Image (cartoon, grey):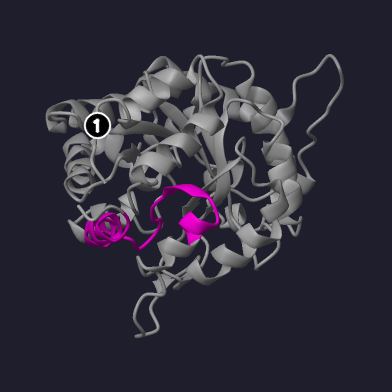
Amino acid sequence: MKSSAKNSPVNFLMKCCSMGSSALLTQMVNDEGPLILDGGLATDLEAHGAKLQGDPLWSARLLHTDPQAIRDAHYRFLLSGADVITTATYQASIPGFISHLEVSAERARELLMSGVHLAKETVKGFESGQRRPLVAGSVGPYGAFLHDGSEYTGAYAEQMSVEVSLIYLKELKVWHRPQIDCLAAAGADLIAFETIPSIKEAEAVVELLREFPNSKAWLSFSCKDQKCISDGSLFADAVRVASRSRQLLAVGVNCCPPDVVEPLLDSAGPLHTSDMSWVVYPNSGEEWDTERGWQTSGKPSAWTPDLSHMWVKQGAALIGGCCRIDPAHIAELRRQLKGR
């Protein structure tokens, strides 16, 4: 597959501003193959010495303490062939920075925006010829701020009302608004709503996205099994919620075991049309323990690049990896799908 300026990721995104974004994404995939996402940012940072285990800010702390480490990690994924890199803002929030870094609200906003600035600086230093990767501003679920693993259960959504009244704003929208505002203002090419565990939170971010009409996004869910997202709702129902937005380029799954991806996409297969593409970036398949971190079984990673061929057949337009997936995995993924 030959790269061209006409079908470059950045040119595609510019067209999305005036045309049907999902249809254009489908066209680009047909011409070029899927866009390659990066892998686990924290995985790579830890491999190069960062101490993130147990930190309530996770990778986002390095926006304050070691921004060069983040630049270096982004660059390694770009070298591996990623078409899209995601910012170190998954666990970032204004309240989180104020609480854990003891900074002002203004400084917290600057730190959040710096996630985009660091990624865009890295892309600018990397780009050459016709290849210009995109920057996705990462927005984690409310559970990521709670730092209790609830982004994999969605339990908190049971206590948070979505519709308070016609007068009062939705609680989850109020929570997410500053993050999206910072990422959009800093110039993220698109927004990545990641590891969303509940229908309720999906409804909130889909509605909130309308307040940022110039922003494009994808929405990916954490899932508990082959049919359901983490709160027990059917993945197909979650996809229906996402389909309400014309600003979403894709909907899908992330940080789930690789072997559940195919049946999950199949379960919502009838909803896949030219207006609804899939985004897929599972983890290695290892188990996460909130006390001890990732538990390795001694077996090879369940994440293998050859699985991506089936996901492409199912309509995946953006494919990458999440936790425990490093630049070498992404390089092999690109070779599998694009031969270069």
* Residue 236, percent from left and from top: 73, 52
In the displayed orientation, state which residue is furthest to the right: 165
Q: What residue sits right under mark 1 in the picture?
A: 4
Question: Looking at the rendering, which quadrant does residue 6 occupy?
Answer: top left
Residue at position x 22%, y 61% in the image: 328
Report if residue 89 is visible in the image. yes
Badge 1 amino acid: Ser
Left or right: residue 78 compared with residue 337: left
Residue 16 rendering spot, x and y as whole percentages: 48, 22
Q: Is residue 24 magenta?
A: no
Q: Is residue 146 at all visible to an observer of this figure? A: no
- The percent coordinates of residue 335 (x first, y second) are 24, 58
Residue at 35 percent across and 65 percent down: it is 305
For this rendering, which residue is in front, 156 or 18? Answer: 18
Q: Is residue 116 above or below residue 232?
A: above
Q: Residues within 10 Å of mark 1 (few under 14, many from 20)?
A: few
Residue found at x 30% / y 40%: 83
Q: Is residue 315 above or below residue 124?
A: below
Q: Range of the magenta residues?
A: 311-337
Nearer to us in this view, 124 or 168? 124
How many tags in the picture?
1
- Name the residue located 19 percent from the left edge and 29 percent from the top edge: 130
Of residues 137 and 113, the one drawn nearer to the viewer in this rendering: 137
Residue 332 among magenta residues: yes
